[in-house]
Amino acid sequence: MASEIIKEQSKIDPQLQKIVAVFDQVAADYDKEALRWFPFCADKMMDILLPSPGMKVLDVAAGTGALTIAAAQRIRPVGRVYAIDLADGMLSVLEAKTRVMGLENIDLFNMNGDQLEFRDQYFDAVCCSFGLFFMPDMQQALREWWRVLKPGGRIIFSSFAQGAFQPMKGLFFDRIEGYGVEFPKGRGQLVVDRLQDQVTCTKLLEGANCSDVQLHHAQVGYHLQRVEDWWDVLWGSGFRGLLLQLDEKERLRFRSEHFKEVSGLAKENGIWMDVGVNLTVGRRA
Ligand SMILES: C[S@@+](CC[C@H](N)C(=O)[O-])C[C@H]1O[C@@H](n2cnc3c(N)ncnc32)[C@H](O)[C@@H]1O
């Protein structure tokens, strides 16, 4: 049977509501070629986790399902992936993909990743790709993931490493700041930068009672062939929240100015986009 999104009616805080609203808006652009680091990273995470057929896997903040799909293929036909997210727009894209791919071992839930509606010790693995840094209390979220994990099961999460998207990200921020755009908590406090530091990542898993904690660094970046690909990255990801503070006329002017500076970075193979990632994994003893 095809997947259906199952709703959970918990209240979410206003800051999180804003994040979710951005993801609802980007959903249709999220699977563009320029953003292919998401499936690349999901594959790396599966290579570390090596889930076996028959397992029950939870994908927290599943989005349009890069990791859900990678996991579902590895554990099918009996194993199931439970994919949860708060953005219905993202889950709807994932639902459509499961139909096209004929994957019948995926269940979708609209659910908050730090308040799980699953019973204790239910899953063989809990995975989260580029989602933990959105949770206001990351330590509490990880404890919640540990709660639903069977003894011997593993948690793995990914986050952006220092230097990801640079130097384009710096140029983008410098220029958009000049337009009076405000960063939710200031430029130095971006949620996506919260897990750049490797010690922070490993300490969080240890603080959630995990043992055998390891961190793997991987590079899932590539050369962009056109400056428009960088715009696809900005417009199809959480960066869009900043661009939406500009009206359409300002956005066009901004785009043309920003294109000039990013074009200047092109080399023989195109524009290198660094997507260094931290993959942190631990076990429930
Ligand atoms: C950067 S996307 C990553 C999606 C997917 N894991 C991937 O790697 O392509 C982050 C996702 O986290 C979701 N999200 C943010 N906070 C969440 C929360 N507290 N609970 C569940 N989902 C959340 C967003 O709606 C969005 O779909």
Image (cartoon, helix red, strand yellow):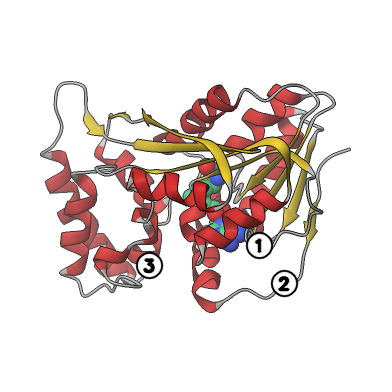
Residue 225 at x, y percent in the picture: 28, 29
Total marks placed: 3
Residue 105, above or below 181: above
- At label 2, the amino acid type is Ser
| Disc 2 and disc 3 in contact, CB within 8 angstroms | no
Describe residue 69's horizontal placement relative to residue 197 as left or right: right
How crowded is the residue under tag 3: few (<14 C-alpha within 10 Å), some, or many (20+)? few
| Disc 2 and disc 1 in contact, CB within 8 angstroms | yes
Describe residue 82's horizontal placement relative to residue 16 as left or right: right
- In the picture of the structure, the residue carrying the numbered disc 3 is 244
How crowded is the residue under tag 2: few (<14 C-alpha within 10 Å), some, or many (20+)? few
> Circle 3 — which element?
loop
Whether the residue carrying mark 1 lies under 8 Å from ligand 1 is answered with: yes
Residue 262, above or below 78: below
For marks 3 and 1, the one nearer the N-term is: 1
Residue 96, above or below 105: below
Residue 235 at x, y percent in the picture: 39, 53
Describe residue 180's horizontal placement relative to residue 192 as left or right: left
- At label 1, the amino acid type is Asn
- In the picture of the structure, the residue carrying the numbered disc 2 is 10
Whether the residue carrying mark 2 lies under 8 Å from ligand 1 is answered with: no
- In the picture of the structure, the residue carrying the numbered disc 1 is 112
Whether the residue carrying mark 3 lies under 8 Å from ligand 1 is answered with: no
> Circle 2 — which element?
loop
**What residue is drawn where x is 66% and y is 58%?**
88
In front here: 135 or 183?
A: 135
For marks 2 and 3, the one nearer the N-term is: 2
For marks 2 and 1, the one nearer the N-term is: 2
